[in-house]
Image (spheres, rainbow, N blue to C red):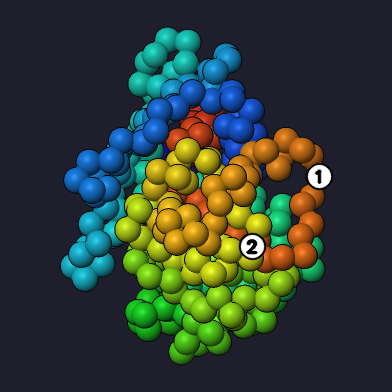
Amino acid sequence: MIDGGHLRRLVSMADAVEAVREAFRLVSGGQFLAPQRVAVGGGTELLMAGRPVENPEGFVTKILTVRPENPGRGLPLLHAVVLWFDGPTGEPLAVLDGETVTAMRTGAASGVATDLLAAPDASTLALIGSGAQARDQVEAVLAVRQVREVRIFSRNETTANELAATLAEAHTELDVRVVPTSSQAVRGAEVVCCATTARAPVFDAADVGPRTHVNAIGSYRPDMCEVPAELLARSRVVVDQREAALAGAGDVIQAIEAGQLDEKRLVEVGDLLLAAERQASEAPTVFKSVGVSAQDWALARVAVERAAASAWS
């Protein structure tokens, strides 16, 4: 059993970013076998699984439940377990804390996209949301950019202030503050991270400048949305996987239905990585992630390998 604290000791965010970077290459290169995730109860229960096509070291599956009412009960929004099976023998080798795997691999995805798409000198980060996913979004951006200022906007002022204090203590070089509106967070920020369960856009498209990169990781169902369709209309839109985005990314689906976005414009982050060059853009960039099992596989592989190595050292 690898619990959340043990997992974070085994795998740094920088490690997670590199692992997920390779996972996206596998996905877009057709080298990862995974069915579309199975959603039960309108997306309140999810099942994801997968492994590489060739010489798989292991097979991963994740079972996840989402309860929007849980934060009001003092409980996490999601609960999850990740199971790791040995590739050659099929033997179950590890159970990992799925909440931590999900938060870290989702943060790492934003780190990969930020490294690829954001301005090299980006120094200001806007964070929309202060829930379980929020801190890892910040940590991932810090792993790839020299951020000096973090502005947090959240409907929950208590958790926003707690997160700001935690980040300020962990990163004394940062100017971290909570702001009263999303506009005050987003205006002038070179990187924006959205980690909410919103069903309507969480900021105004007019607040996003031409050099801004947006990571949107909160919406995972067609009825959810964080990013204005007007922004997608004038942005370069990058997704973790086309099929997954078209099936579950409410931001993308709603923009297509409104005639603001042509699905042919969607580009997979793995395709950009396989092109092996940094992607400069004069327009804003948006990375929309709903999550794919290759991310879970990549993070679990590193954790299980290191846990096994430490057990024998």
| Front residue (pair 140, 211) | 211
- On the rendered structure, is 249 left or right of 74? right
| Up/down of 34 relative to 45, above or below | above
Q: Residue furthest front?
A: 259
Q: Which residue is drawn at 58% across and 63% down?
A: 233
Q: Which mark is residue 235?
A: 2
Q: Residue furthest bottom?
A: 180
- x and y, in percent, of residue 134 in the image: 46, 65
Q: Which residue is drawn at 40% across and 28% down?
A: 35
- Assign the C terminus to one quadrant of the image: top right
Indicate the secondary structure of the residue bearing disc 2. Answer: loop
Indicate the secondary structure of the residue bearing disc 1. Answer: loop
In which quadrant of the rendered view does residue 122 lie?
bottom right
In which quadrant of the rendered view does residue 89 lie?
top left
Q: Residue at x 50, y 27 (%)?
A: 308
- Residue 1 visible? The answer is no
| Up/down of 110 relative to 32, above or below | below
Circle 2: residue type: Ser
Q: Read off the residue under disc 1.
A: 277
- x and y, in percent, of residue 145 in the image: 72, 63
- Assign the N terminus to one quadrant of the image: top left
| Front residue (pair 192, 141) | 192
Q: How far apart are marks 1 and 2 (CA)?
A: 19 Å
Circle 1: residue type: Glu
